[in-house]
Image (cartoon, rainbow, N blue to C red):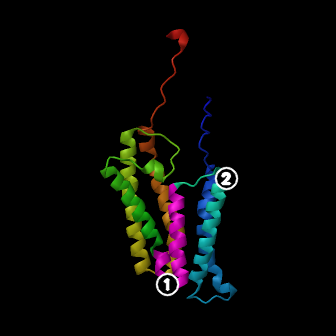
Amino acid sequence: MLIEPVPPRRHLAPLPKLALELGPLVLFFLGNAYAERFGVSADQKLFVATGLFIAATVIALTIHYALVRRLPIMPLVSGVVVVVFGGLTLFLQDKTFIMVKPTIVNTLFGLVLLGGLAFGKSLLSVVLDSMFTLTEEGWRKLTFRWGLFFLALAALNEVVWRTQTEDFWVNFKVFGIMPLTVLFALAQTPLLSRYERKAPEEVDPAKA
């Protein structure tokens, strides 16, 4: 009986992946920034932006699945929270739900990562759909750092939405959280290099 080989897991190229992740955020920002030009009152523009955000998120997830036939954990969880909390925002006409969405998502990821470490599990490769390999020590250290970072983002979002204006929070969500995440990821490059799991060197039969 022949066993068919398991096809390799497909990943999106960096540029399409970035476009699908940033697209909904850009539409969210544009909807909030320009809704008044289309006759939407100032106190309703965030609801318009939220509707666009939900629709764009669903479309982005659908395209992602169509391209690689699977959905990474992080975008999927974030998308579900967007739909649920965005839907509550529109249904109840309460902006609080969409504003606490980053708090909920980042707290969830932070607790999952740190909780996994408490049980001896490094879950970062699952959460971030990682394409690189590290030693066990490297995964533990990287998971711990990302867990703390996600909790810090959650706390920062709470401070911003509770103390600043609605427009300031929208700008922070689009132009604050994403750049901070990219900078933090780049800052982990030395750790990735140090703890990268090296492939075993092939032995030359002639020298064996």
**Residue 73 position in % (x across, y down):** 51, 56
User: Residue 83 colored magenta?
Assistant: yes
Q: Nearer the viewer, residue 160 or 139?
A: 139
Identify which residue is drawn at 44% across, 77% down: 161
**Residue 1 position in % (x across, y down):** 61, 28
Q: Is residue 171 visible?
A: no
Q: Is residue 192 visible?
A: yes
In the image, residue 172 sits, relative to residue 92, either above or below, namely above
In the image, residue 187 sits, relative to residue 84, either above or below, namely above
Tell me: 143 left or right of 98: left
Q: Look at mark 1 in the image and give the residue it sits on.
A: 94
> Nearer the N terminus, badge 1 or badge 2?
2
Taking the view exactly as shown, the residue that stands out farthest to the left is 118
Identify which residue is drawn at 50% across, 58% down: 74
Q: Look at mark 2 in the image and give the residue it sits on.
A: 67
In the image, residue 87 sits, relative to residue 155, either above or below, namely below
Q: Which residues are magenta?
A: 73-99
Under mark 1, the amino acid is Asp
Under mark 2, the amino acid is Leu
Identify which residue is drawn at 63% across, 71% down: 55
Q: Nearer the viewer, residue 143 or 10?
A: 10
Q: Quadrant of residue 41?
A: bottom right
Per the image, label 2 sits on a secondary structure element best described as helix
Q: Are marks 1 and 2 in contact (CB under 8 Å)?
A: no
Taking the view exactly as shown, the residue that stands out farthest to the front is 1
In the image, residue 46 sits, relative to residue 62, either above or below, namely below
User: Residue 67 colored magenta?
Assistant: no
